[in-house]
Image: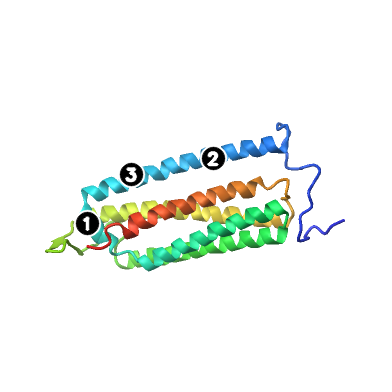
Amino acid sequence: MADSHATTLEPEAHNPALLHHFADAQQQKNAASLGMWLFLVTEIMFFGGMFCAYLVYRLAHFNAFAAASQQLSIKLGAFNTAVLLVSSLTVVLAVKAAEAGNRKQLVTYLVITVLLGLTFLVVKGFEYAEKFERHHVPGPTFSFTDTFDDGSQKIPVNPNEAQLYFSLYFAMTGMHALHMIIGCGLFTVLAVFAWKGHYSPGYFTPIENAGLYWHLVDIIWIYLFPLLYLISRHR
């Protein structure tokens, strides 16, 4: 009998994860995938509403939003973008490892994905800390005295309009960070299950669905980064 912690997964004649109300494993996989895609559509609608609100208010308060965006660090934002792009690659490799039945690689790539997600959150924590230090967090202590330079003159910025920018910034990046935390927890659980041999070449649907979730979270950041950090960056 093969060791339960062997590197290579053994295909199973009977899938213990097959629920009784499904005719076969493929039907169960299709149902799970459909459910995940429906969930992702609701996520897109949720973040899409915030994207639309941000664009509308940016057009209405262009000077304040442009001046406020100057307070964000492009270097940290670009670093986090690179981190998430690499994490998407490790997720793809994890799915490939599960499909090939390589338990060791599967666990390794899942753990690396979690570490990359935690790296993103730590960097975002430093960004948030800097906003608290500079009183750029919306609330009674909010302070913003920067101006917008349109090339010919410096235009004073309405602090209330700048506060609106940071309100949207914290709402959008905060919800994204929450999804990152959920994703890290999810992949941690999957890594533990993978080490225990719960997945095989015939059954790795949870890995695939978790990968879809992670890719969506990454794509959302790909939109957040230019919207919040790059658009109208140069005055």
Q: Which residue is mark 1?
A: 64
Q: How is the model colour-coded?
A: rainbow
Which amino acid type is marked by label 3?
Cys
- Quadrant (top left, top right, bottom left, bottom right) of the C terminus: bottom left
Q: Residue furthest right?
A: 1
Percent x, y of residue 77: 40, 63
The residues bearing labels 1 and 3 have C-alpha atoms spaced at a distance of: 18 Å
Q: Quadrant of residue 79?
A: bottom left
Which amino acid type is marked by label 2?
Trp
Q: Is residue 234 above or below residue 172?
A: below
Circle on res. 37: 2
Percent x, y of residue 109: 62, 61
Which amino acid type is marked by label 1?
Ala
First of labels 1, 2 by sequence position: 2
**Left/right of residue 99 with respect to residue 45 in the rendered view:** right
Circle on res. 13: none
Is disc 1 surrounded by few (<14), some (14 to 19) or many (20+) residues within 10 Å? many
Is disc 3 surrounded by few (<14), some (14 to 19) or many (20+) residues within 10 Å? few
In the image, what residue occupies the spot 53% across and 63% down?
A: 116
Q: Is residue 67 above or below residue 179?
A: below
Q: Quadrant of residue 52?
A: top left
Q: Which residue is mark 3?
A: 52
